[in-house]
Image (cartoon, rainbow, N blue to C red):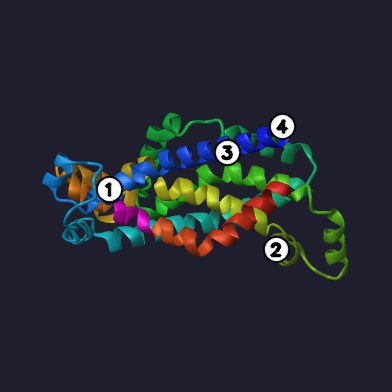
Amino acid sequence: MKKNKEKRNLISIEVLGIVLGLLWISPFYLMIVNAFKSKRDIFEGVLGIPETFQFQNFVQAFIDLEFLKSLFNSVLITGLSIFFIIIFSSMAGYALARNKSKLSGIMFFIFVAAMLIPFQSVMIPLVSLFGMVDMLNAGGLIFMYLGFGCSLSIFLYHGAMTGVSRTMDEAAIIDGANRLQLFWYIIFPLLKPISVTVGILNVIWIWNDYLLPSLVLSESNATIPLKMFYFFGQYTKQWHLALAGLTIAIIPVIIGYFFAQRQIIKGVSEGAVK
């Protein structure tokens, strides 16, 4: 009787999982299927498989989206932002965790409190300030991402440092290492799991961000989300081209995850254990 009940519960969970999976994948199905249709076919039947696959939709969307240029802008801004966030946040987290003083405690509290400040409240003053110093460009955008991304990242690195024994610092210093050598050769490699976690969290945010680039970048230097906004504005009624452009836009994320999934899963799981 107990085994039958457990079996029924297991079947119920499997059925629920399948239903949730279908619900999750349904928007992707609608996007991809309709991207291969003509405008007329979409209005005649949204759910059906296209009778004739319109590959020209993707060619036209690729050209009008200026995909390679937009992809380069997104990769450059995201990559440099993540690099600087990891470098500066890891060093700050280490320094704040190792220096137990009132000043370091106050600084850590300020970083944690900064996570509660919504971007919308500082949006206009920030853009005005950067406009005055002529930094409304990709470099200014990266600097803004560094400022907004460091609070959570420092908090995570600070927490991870509690699991790293001080005896390692003392042993390295006795062997003649200075503080920078101690951090880069001893401490930083131990923080790899949390660095992967920090990288994932910030990549998801920066890669998909629309609001900040829309305030800083021109259309000629637009990232993929910003370019998609202009693209949808141009093709609001031509859904076959708009959906083809949206499909092209998500391909880099899928490819990136495919090649990095093992490292991502390992980093997140180890970071969670720490």
First in sequence: mark 4 or mark 1?
4
Assess disc 2: are there few (<14), some (14-19) or many (≥20) residues with their C-alpha within 10 Å of its C-alpha: few
Q: How many marks?
A: 4
First in sequence: mark 3 or mark 4?
4
Q: Amino acid at mark 4?
A: Met
Q: Amino acid at mark 2?
A: Pro
Question: Which stretch appears magenta?
Answer: 246-251
Q: Which mark is residue 1?
A: 4
First in sequence: mark 4 or mark 2?
4
Q: Which mark is residue 11?
A: 3
Q: Nearer the viewer, mark 3 or mark 4?
A: 4
Q: Which mark is residue 189?
A: 2
Q: Which residue does the image show at 14% across and 40% down from the upper left? A: 44
**Residue 129 x %, y %:** 40, 40
Report whether 192 appears left or right of 219: right
Q: Which mark is residue 228?
A: 1
Q: Amino acid at mark 1?
A: Met
- The outermost residue toward the bottom is 175
Report whether 92 appears left or right of 162: left
Quadrant in the picture for residue 51: bottom left
Magenta-colored stretch includes residue 248: yes
Q: Nearer the viewer, mark 2 or mark 3?
A: 3
- Label 2's element? helix
Q: Which residue does the image show at 18% across and 56% down from the upper left? A: 57
- Label 3's element? helix
Magenta-colored stretch includes residue 129: no
Q: Nearer the viewer, mark 4 or mark 1?
A: 4
- Label 1's element? helix
Spatial CA distance of label 2 from label 3 is 44 Å
Report whether 245 appears left or right of 160: left
Q: Nearer the viewer, mark 1 or mark 2?
A: 1
